[in-house]
Image (spheres, helix red, strand yellow):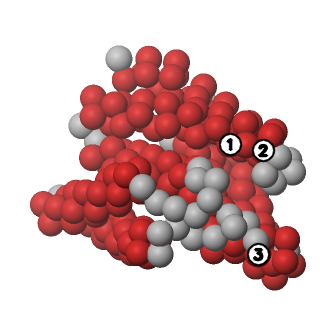
Amino acid sequence: MKEIIVWLVHTPAGTVGLIAAAVALFSKKGAALHRKAGTYFTVSMLVMLIAGLVAGLLIGSPGDMLLSAVVMYTVFTAWLTVHHKVNGTGFLEQVALAWIVAVAMAAFFLNAVWREAGTQNIYLFWVGFAVFCALGDLRNLYRAGLSGIQRVIRHVWRLGFSLIWTVLALTDKIVKTLGSNVKELPEEQLLYIVGIPTILMLLLILFWIINILFFSRKKYAGYGH
């Protein structure tokens, strides 16, 4: 059952998400094509992540379930940040905050009870990341929504985080089709199959953040007003 979910739902949905993300990244920001691609990205990613959550539950992998829950949050809040035509927050922002607080609590609990060597630090990372996101959500709710550069950066970095994990998930599937895993794959193949695509995606997201902060401030300063 787990393999059926992964190969028939999880992987195809993630592939559609990456294609939609590429269209959104390179289309005119705010245009109809950009918005439509963003919607396709959000829906396909949520389908992929729900499938990943179910697959993680079936195999009893709390790490996979936790990762799916975190990326579901970043995908949803990236979309939610620009969902409102004018500044504002609502019930969905409160749901997102409750979700990431629950993730932080789950990660903290797993860190306390899981004794497998090396995994505790991973769970502590997710605790810290979830707390960081929750603080950002509280700020957003307190200010009744963000605008301008702050709104765009919130959208881009959450989108970027989601995309990086999507690339990692896709490359992991490629490695598995080769009959191997990331621990057994030769370093050279690991670099080409996993390292380079992930680094390129990271650089692309950093490019957009730097471009928005330092070269396109005037263009995005009025966004959301």
The mark that comes first in sequence, 3 or 1, is 1
Residue 34: which numbered mark, if any?
A: 2
Q: Residue at x 58, y 40 (%)?
A: 42
Kind of residue sitting beneath label 3: Ala
Please say if the residues under marks 1 and 2 sit with CB atoms less than 8 Å apart. Answer: yes
Query: Disc 1 marks which residue?
Result: 38
Categorize mark 1 by other alpha carbons within 10 Å: few (<14), some (14-19), many (20+): many
The secondary structure type at the circle numbered 2 is helix
Q: Residue at x 45, y 46 (%)?
A: 72
In the rendered image, which quarter is residue 34 located in?
top right
The mark that comes first in sequence, 3 or 2, is 2
- Of tags 3 and 2, which is closer to the observer? 3
Is 214 displayed left or right of 11 in the figure?
right
Kind of residue sitting beneath label 1: Gly
Q: Quadrant of the C terminus?
A: bottom right
Is 42 displayed left or right of 183 in the figure?
right
- Looking at the image, is 172 positioned above or below residue 222? above
Query: Disc 3 marks which residue?
Result: 221
Please say if the residues under marks 3 and 2 sit with CB atoms less than 8 Å apart. Answer: no
- Of tags 3 and 1, which is closer to the observer? 3
Kind of residue sitting beneath label 2: His
Q: Position of residue 138 (x, y in %)?
A: 38, 72
- Looking at the image, is 80 positioned above or below residue 42? below
The secondary structure type at the circle numbered 3 is helix
Q: Quadrant of the N terminus?
A: top left
Q: Residue at x 54, y 52 (%)?
A: 80
The span from disc 3 to disc 1 (Cα, nearest Å) is 21 Å
Note whether residue 55 is visible: yes
In the rendered image, which quarter is residue 205 located in?
bottom right
